[in-house]
């Protein structure tokens, strides 16, 4: 792969080698006219990939799933999962394949995965396809999350296929997203073997998972319980970061909950504009199961499903296994609370987490139409003696000045606090109205310029750029509410 003049790419295949029964060998679909639309050169370089190859016709063939290197062992992964609370024992990659694993220059292993690469044996009623708008959406939002320091899968490339695919709004350009993840192991991967009572395979999966994500636990006596604890910690911290950004995942099913603690599957996700704990964007989330405020509760519910799957590996006695797993599950609430307080203490540049002050702020926001992202970037003015930019964000301002006074009383060094606030709180996020306009232009007018501008902004989310004020501003109050979709 790194040799001069080579026109292919080599993969490692530990998943294919070690996890029989958890996949079917599978190829991508050949396309009429695969074209590279976007390549994440920075990511490719950090993975030690050959840019010239990725940009070549062979590279495009690989990144679109049109034709994979001959010695690759591509596969569709099997998994189970609770979707909106209901269990499906057999889900799996319905429209995706794992091409293989890449070892980066530091020796770290990454999955290269293609989404939209055609139907697989797990496709059920689906067409196996993805279209350009949602592919660009995942590209944009996952890159924004990476720039914001949130653990996430990354977008390596987006390709079009040269054909059109039927969706809600008619025919749209077919597309494939090439994404990179530290693994695609999910809570649902464990549920797959657990549901079938295949304890020995579950043990193999545990060993594989530990080797990849928690090598220090390999061979330790309480490895299964240890993994449960690590996943609890990673998911607690992840969801706390989402809450600090107003990020709403939208489909926190157990098959979309990673063992690595990376955010995965950017289907119906969106960033909240005006603060409202009940915010939901997904067209199918009628009960608000995956609303902003419910995310920590759901993360704990999902961990309980992982605990159930791991029970036979935690202790041979079921009652003891349950008692031990329950302890970890209960501790997740504290892990989350601590992570959440840390996130908001950092955003507010507090010297230490102050639960009372942080909770008072959430109460102050409630029902007052405050643009969540703008609030934090208005705080520096309040440290320079001007409360007006903060007050302007509130539909009703009673109590706001009092809260600001209490907050200011905790800031010892205003200049340093301003620097921290501007380094931690983004100015540019993928705001829904900006995302929609960029995807419309890309999908229906063949125009990527708005997308490129927005991508550049969210990749450097903290740095103001002159002339780009529109990208930091909330949507007009009368802008239509955004609705998002799964399986697009
Ligand atoms: P998601 O909610 O996007 O994580 O998808 C849930 C399941 O549906 C996964 O097994 C996907 O592979 C599958 N799926 C979603 N969209 C399609 C599609 N268009 N064709 C086939 N399978 C799909
Ligand atoms: Mg999924």
Image (cartoon, rainbow, N blue to C red):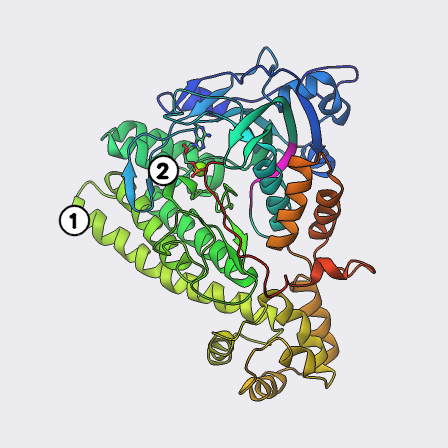
Helix, strand or loop at mark 2: helix
Query: Taking 59 as reference, is 12 left or right?
Result: left
Which residue is located at x 47 percent, y 74 percent?
A: 366
Q: Which picture quadrant has residue 30?
A: top right
Magenta: predominant secondary structure element? strand
Marking on residue 188: 2
**Residue 120, percent across and down?**
43, 21
For label 2, count other residues whose C-alpha is less than 10 Å away and answer few (under 14), some (14-19) or many (20+): many
In this figure, which residue is indicated by the disc labeled 1?
319
User: Where is residue 54 shown, x and y percent of the image?
Assistant: 71, 24
Of the two numbered discs 1 and 2 on the same chain, state the one appearing first in sequence: 2
Count the labels in the image: 2
C-alpha separation, residue under disc 1 versus residue under disc 2: 23 Å
Closest to the observer, 107 or 486: 486
The part of the chain drawn in magenta is 152-157
Q: Is residue 263 magenta?
A: no
| Foreground pick, 187 / 203 | 187
Few, some or many residues within 10 Å of mark 1 (<14, 14–19, 20+)? few
Q: Ligand 2 falls in which quarter?
A: top left
**The residue carrying mark 2 has its beta carbon less than 8 Å from ligand 2:** no
Task: Check whether the beta carbons of the residues at disc 1 and disc 2 lie within 8 A of each other.
Answer: no
List the single residue furthest toward the top: 70
Is residue 428 in view from this perspective? yes
Badge 1 element: helix
């Amino acid at each position: 792969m790194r040799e001069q003049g080579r026109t292919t790419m080599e993969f490692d295949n530990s998943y294919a080698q070690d996890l029989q029964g958890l996949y079917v060998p599978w190829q991508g679909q050949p396309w009429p006219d695969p074209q590279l639309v976007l390549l994440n050169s920075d990511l490719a370089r950090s993975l030690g990939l050959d840019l010239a190859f990725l940009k070549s016709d062979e590279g495009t063939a690989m990144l679109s799933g049109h034709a994979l290197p001959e010695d690759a062992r591509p596969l569709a992964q099997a998994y189970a999962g609770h979707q909106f609370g209901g269990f499906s024992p057999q889900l799996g990659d319905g429209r995706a394949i794992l091409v293989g694993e890449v070892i980066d220059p530091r020796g770290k292993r990454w999955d290269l995965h293609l989404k939209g690469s055609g139907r697989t044996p797990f496709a059920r009623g689906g067409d196996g396809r993805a279209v350009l708008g949602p592919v660009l959406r995942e590209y944009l939002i996952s890159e924004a999350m990476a720039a914001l320091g949130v653990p996430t899968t990354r977008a390596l490339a987006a390709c079009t296929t040269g054909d059109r695919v039927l969706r809600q709004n008619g025919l749209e350009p077919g597309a494939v997203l090439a994404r990179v993840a530290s693994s695609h192991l999910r809570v649902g991967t464990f549920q797959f073997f657990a549901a079938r009572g295949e304890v020995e395979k579950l043990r193999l999966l545990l060993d594989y998972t530990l080797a990849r994500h928690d090598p220090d636990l390999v061979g330790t006596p309480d490895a299964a319980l240890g993994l449960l604890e690590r996943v609890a910690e990673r998911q607690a911290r992840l969801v706390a970061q989402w809450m600090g950004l107003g990020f709403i995942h939208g489909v926190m099913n157990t098959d979309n909950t990673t063992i690595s603690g990376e955010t995965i599957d950017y289907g119906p996700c969106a960033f909240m504009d005006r603060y409202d704990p009940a915010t939901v964007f997904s067209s199918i989330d009628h009960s608000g199961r995956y609303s902003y405020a419910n995310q920590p509760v759901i993360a704990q519910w999902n961990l309980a499903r992982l605990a159930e799957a791991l029970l036979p590996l935690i202790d041979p006695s079921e009652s003891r296994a349950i008692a031990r797993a329950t302890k970890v599950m209960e501790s997740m609430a504290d892990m989350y609370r601590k992570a959440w307080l840390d996130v908001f203490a950092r955003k507010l540049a507090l010297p230490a987490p102050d639960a009372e002050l942080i909770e008072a702020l959430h109460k102050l926001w409630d029902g007052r139409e405050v643009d969540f992202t703008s609030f934090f970037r208005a705080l520096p003015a309040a440290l320079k003696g001007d409360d007006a930019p903060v007050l302007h964000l509130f539909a009703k301002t009673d109590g706001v000045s009092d809260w600001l006074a209490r907050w200011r009383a905790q800031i010892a060094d205003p200049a340093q606090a301003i620097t921290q606030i501007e380094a931690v709180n983004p100015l540019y996020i993928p705001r829904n109205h900006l995302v929609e306009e960029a995807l419309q232009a890309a999908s229906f007018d063949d125009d990527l310029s708005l997308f490129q501008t927005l991508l550049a902004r969210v990749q450097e989310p903290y740095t103001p750029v002159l002339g780009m004020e529109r990208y930091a501003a909330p949507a007009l109050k009368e802008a239509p509410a955004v609705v998002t979709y799964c399986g697009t």
